Image (cartoon, grey):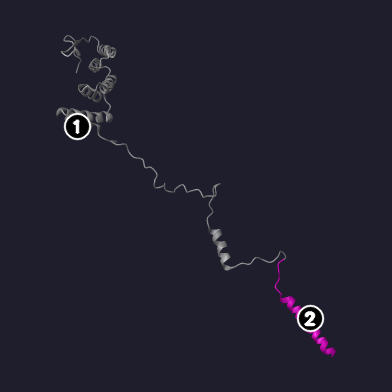
Amino acid sequence: MRRALGAAALLAVSVAVGAWLFAPRVPAGGPAPATSATSGKDEVANRERPRTRESTTGKVPPASHEAAPADSPTPVAPVGAGTDAKQLREEADRLIAERRIPEAIDALRKATAADPSARNHGDLGRLLAGVMALDEALVHLRKAAELDSGNADRWIELANAYYRKVDLGKAWEAERRAKQAEPGLVLGRDASGMRVRGSDSPRPNP
């Protein structure tokens, strides 16, 4: 009987010691979090993904090389840019020779815009004065006289336009400028009363 009890006690002690030896150990800081193959892959992907700086609004600022929106305005060259002024003037001369005055005036406007020379301003002003478009004619005749101020004929033509406009003060001022540009100039009048060089007035050198 005593032997049976001793064997049973010894067996119980052996079972307890075995259970203690083979029981899983728990770290001192508490059980480790459970991991899986999927969470491990996510961690690797997060480490490899490039980090981008977010703005204060929480949105990632666009890269500097991003294309402009499709509706962004595209610069457009002005109409007539690069037009050959010489060709425009030749077209105007052809129309003048054919006595197609309205079309010649329109062509000369374009030629003058492309090449605002004294010649273009003067010829355009002369055509406009011929059809009594005096306000526009005076703008171009004055510009021609200012660009070619040493040419007395420019000022005489401007004076006559002011006479037609019945602006005598400006007509006399234009006459004064003509005589200033050409000392000794004598002015007369033609059959229509317009100012012309007098018969004894010296002719300018061509």
Q: What residue type is labelled 2?
A: Val
Query: Magenta region: which residues?
Result: 1-27
Along the viewing direction, whichever of 129 and 86 lies nearer the viewer:
129
93 above or below 203? below
Q: Tell how many labels.
A: 2
Q: Position of residue 150 (x, y in %)?
A: 26, 17
Mark 2 element type? helix
Mark 1 element type? helix
128 above or below 64? above
Determine the residue located farthest toward the left in the rendered image: 98
Left or right of 44 on screen, residue 2: right
Q: Distance between the residues labelled 2 and 1?
A: 124 Å
What residue is pinned by disc 2? 13
Q: Which residue is drawn at 56% across and 63% down?
A: 42
Main SS of residues in magenta? helix
Whether 95 is among the magenta residues is: no
Whether 16 is among the magenta residues is: yes
